[in-house]
Image: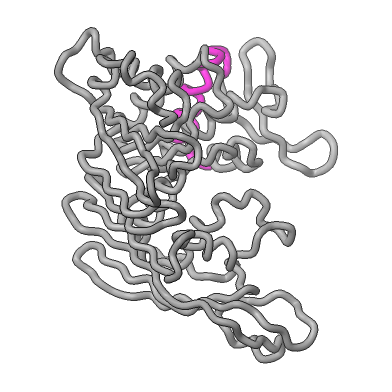
Amino acid sequence: MIQSFHIDGFRGIHNLTVDNLNSVNLIVGDNNCGKTSVLEALQLLSAPSQISNLFRVARSRDFILTSGGVSLYENVMCLFPHTESRYEIGIHAIINDRQVDCCIHGEESRIMIVPEETSGEIFQHSVMLGETEADQFIGSIDYVYANRRGSTPLHLNTFSKASGVTIGKSSVIRMAYISPSEHLRSNIVSQIVRNDEYKEICIAALQLFDPDIIDILQMKSTVGIRVVDYLKHRTLGSMPLSTFGDGVKKVLVLANAIARSANGVLLIDEVETAIHKKYYDDIFRFIVKACRTFHVQVFITTHSIEAVDGLLATQDYHQQTMSDDISVITIKKENRKSYSRILSGREVAENRESFGFEVRL
């Protein structure tokens, strides 16, 4: 469980502290206030010593990871605060009563690259003709976790690639992240069918939409050798997943991520994406109940007051007067600094009219 965190420079966030975190944490605020950046910063804490984790976070917004996308170097450099001349990122947290830090710093410079002289380097480079100039960053990732303190050298340049970078085995906390576009990716079902327990959770979630959905399958296409994703229906038979709407795919992504983050942390960016308002009650109750069952602490960003209402409704405040699993964190940027206000879900529910559209302030 993440009990508190402090971000001392990350993307557009400057000096943000959030305390008193809960099992379910709603992060609300205006567009471009830093809601997604908070989730990315928390991801760095999951494995603070690993370069592979840094690269994964840096590329999370770049949906096109091909030659047409932004370079890895640009993605990493964009993580640093935009208005600072120095290159420093500082993320600190208390997780399970222990201090966890991830601090990245270094310097940028220009270098000469000769293709035939780079074969022995850790990072692979694009094919180039002759000598060329490139930007480079030399620094380190300084980390603290589990009473360990250390530093990982960080060296990359304009032509660096993520492919081939070692993924470490150790991590601070189990963590899964769901982007707003996650349901558009094509590997949802292949992740689910490998694990029977995950599959049962996903089927239960899909039955919120249609109780006659009884199985999730992958079968060989009748045309060619491609594998096709199917949902088995009691009356319709096996139907391709592509014939269902994005809401069904979003629920599959949510259920799979909850199972993968058992006894850890789940980060959901823009939870309302692809979900129609009429399903808010059932789906949000499923999220909260499943996270409680699998001991998952969840952070959810939204700029929808209707989504906030739907998530608060899962607590049934009118029936019980003591327990409250929700905290509502409002983030606001002012004069290059980020501020947060934390209210309990009960406080927001009881003062709903005055809270109003403050999620967008």
Q: What stretch is highlighted in magenta?
A: 194-213
Asked if residue 148 is positioned above or below residue 69 in the image, the reply reads below
- Residue 65 spot, x, y in % from top left: 66, 56
Q: Quadrant of residue 129?
A: bottom right
Please indicate whether residue 38 sits to the left or right of residue 246 in the image.
Answer: left
Residue positioned 37% across, 18% down in the render: 356
Residue found farthest to the front: 335
Asked if residue 114 is positioned above or below residue 20 in the image, the reply reads below
Q: Can residue 344 be seen in this view?
A: yes
Q: Quadrant of residue 89?
A: bottom left
Please indicate whether residue 140 sits to the left or right of residue 219 in the image.
Answer: left
Residue positioned 28% across, 36% down in the render: 341
Asked if residue 218 is positioned above or below residue 1 in the image, the reply reads above
Q: In the picture, which quadrant includes the C terminus?
A: top left
Residue positioned 61% across, 13% down in the render: 234
Decide whether residue 263 is among the magenta residues.
no
- Residue 226 spot, x, y in % from top left: 76, 42
Q: Can residue 53 be seen in this view?
A: no
Q: In the picture, which quadrant includes the N terminus?
A: top left
Residue positioned 25% across, 71% down in the render: 149
| Count of numbered labels shown in the rendering | 0
Residue found farthest to the bottom: 117
Q: Quadrant of residue 210?
A: top right
Please indicate whether residue 92 sits to the left or right of residue 277 in the image.
Answer: left
Give the color scheme: rainbow, by chain, secondary structure or one colour: one colour
Residue found farthest to the right: 223
- Residue 354 spot, x, y in % from top left: 31, 17
Asked if residue 273 is positioned above or below residue 333 in the image, the reply reads above
Comparing 123 with 341, the one in front is: 341
- Residue 250 spot, x, y in % from top left: 55, 30
